[in-house]
Image (tube, grey):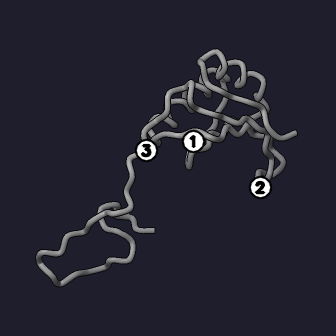
Amino acid sequence: MSKNKKIPIGVVYSTNQDFDYSFENEEVVETLSPEKQKLKIQLDKKSRAGKQVTLVTGFVGNEDDLEALSKKLKNFCGCGGSAKDGEILIQGDVRDKLLSWLIAQNYKAVKSGG
């Protein structure tokens, strides 16, 4: 992956002085309101050395709003975690706690998986 976000992948060098690096595939994703979000909460322990994490998927929005929601959830649960690619990972099994908080904040959230 290109470290420089301004240059599209595949373009290394151009001798044309007027060459314009255009980004045709960039889309600005708007964050849906909490009432329109459909979040799934599930327990996951794959590829984590047997450790359990609570996985919140289905978030539609930009990365900044995802990080903000992740921070609120981590503060509420008092544990660590991360957010990337539309998923929020919270350490430990806190599905019931997250479900009650998300419903109180008007999110449409359901538990999925076993």
- Local SS, label 3: loop
In the picture, the quarter occupied by the C terminus is: top right
Q: Earlier in the sequence, mark 2 or mark 3?
A: 3
> Residue at point 27% right, 66% down?
22
Which numbered mark, 2 or 3, is in the foreground of this view?
Answer: 3
Residue beneath label 1, please?
83
Residue neighbourhood size for the residue with mark 2, other residues' Cα within 10 Å, grouped as few (<14), some (14–19), many (≥20): few
Q: Earlier in the sequence, mark 3 or mark 1?
A: 3
Figure quadrant of residue 10: bottom left
Distance of label 3 from label 1 (alpha carbons): 16 Å
Residue beneath label 2, please?
47
Distance of label 2 from label 3 (alpha carbons): 30 Å
**Residues at discs 3 and 1 in contact (Cβ within 8 Å):** no
- Where's residue 93, x and y in %? 79, 32
> Considering depth in this image, is 76 or 109 the residue closer to the camera?
109
- Where's residue 20, x and y in %? 20, 70
Q: Earlier in the sequence, mark 2 or mark 1?
A: 2
Amino acid type for the residue under numbered disc 2: Ser
Label of residue 29 in the image: 3
The outermost residue toward the left is 17
Residue neighbourhood size for the residue with mark 3, other residues' Cα within 10 Å, grouped as few (<14), some (14–19), many (≥20): few
